[in-house]
Image (tube, grey):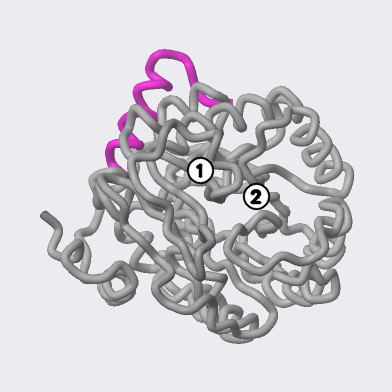
Amino acid sequence: MNPLRLLPPETAHKLALFAVKNKLVPAAAQDEPQTRLELFGKTFVNPVGLAAGADKNAKALAGWARLGFGFVEAGTVTRFPRQGNPAPRLWRLGDGHIINWMGLPNKGMDHFAARLRDFQSAPERKNLIVGASLASPENNGDDLRLLSTAIAPLADYLSLNVSCPNVGAHEASPVRELVRAVVSEAGKTPVLVKLAPEESKDALQKTAEDALNAGAAGFIATNTMPWNKRGQLRNTPFDWPQKDGAPVGGYSGPLLLDTSCRMVREIRAIAGAAIPVIGCGGVQSGDDAKALFSSGANAVQIYTGLVYKGPRLIADIKRAFRALRRQDQPPP
């Protein structure tokens, strides 16, 4: 058993991040040409990405490259520092399952930009695509414009998180307005939209079309599953965490894979073959990643799978990707 599993989840995460930041992790084998792909004008050395939330302040980018990731989505960052929700706010629930109620804790835009700026001169930068996840918990377009202005010149892509289930409810702004706010200041940096799990095809189509019409360059599907949408999961083998008698947080883990694959298929059908789609959610094996690639994902992101399976999961996904290419069934 991984000894970090004996520690409280947040403590384990902090120790793991310390190890990655200081390169106290094994170096992955050099990527083969068969794992390379082109997305939005950028060359990815492989299609395995680290999902937003694992490195909220972009403090360990060189270490993630050492582990073998082809891209890292740092953040989610907000304009001002946030403490996030009170602890406990992260739960391991059985084999492979996590619920988080973090509430977007981060050190804010200025600190985040400084970390990205420091990484520009690192030798690992040439082989790592760096994305930045942006959010405004208040759906404030001015905050998003300022975030985009500060972060876009330092990142390969921006990801707009309009679907975090772990912050207080605010009056929703149309997705097109939020996307326009980011795109307006992003310059040539592409903007992807991270989608919430959605059962309604009509609602998903409207969201996707609004995002594309506002200038979005692609999509990430999907975010964690909140309690009020848990009907999309198979029966959950655990009790949902509660605060003050109410369920909180969003689920990530193997039960999310079916929803992620369905979302990727539906987005691909709506957006067409040319729009980049990154699959996220439920990937804990090479076969899981293969299911997302076969559903139409160009690349995949992992986080919970890394917690439970460790760095070997990265190599497993690369093998699955190469196998698909050998079968003349490359992802779009």
Vertical placement of residue 212 versus 88, above or below: above
Vertical placement of residue 3 versus 88, above or below: above
| Mark 2 to mark 1 CA distance (whole Å) | 9 Å
For the point 70% across and 43% down, which residue is it? 218
Which quadrant would residue 135 be assigned to in this image? bottom right
Whether residue 92 sits left or right of residue 151 in the image: it is left
From the image, tell me which residue sits under label 2: 194
Crowd rating for badge 2 (residues with CA inside 10 Å; few <14, some 14–19, many 20+) = many
* Residue 15 point in image, percent of width and height: 26, 75
Return the residue nearer the eye: 22 or 38.
22
For badge 2, the amino acid type reads: Lys
Q: Earlier in the sequence, mark 2 or mark 1?
A: 2
For the point 58% across and 63% down, which residue is it? 166
Which quadrant would residue 38 be assigned to in this image? top right
Q: Which residues are magenta?
A: 314-332
Whether residue 237 sits left or right of residue 28 in the image: it is right
* Residue 190 point in image, percent of width and height: 72, 53
For badge 1, the amino acid type reads: Cys
Name of the residue lying farthest toward the front? 245
From the image, tell me which residue sits under label 1: 280
* Labels 2 & 1 near each other (Cβ < 8 A): yes
Return the residue nearer the eye: 104 or 181.
104
Residue 114 appearing in the image: no
| Label 2 residue SS | strand
Return the residue nearer the eye: 11 or 176.
11
Q: Is residue 129 magenta?
A: no
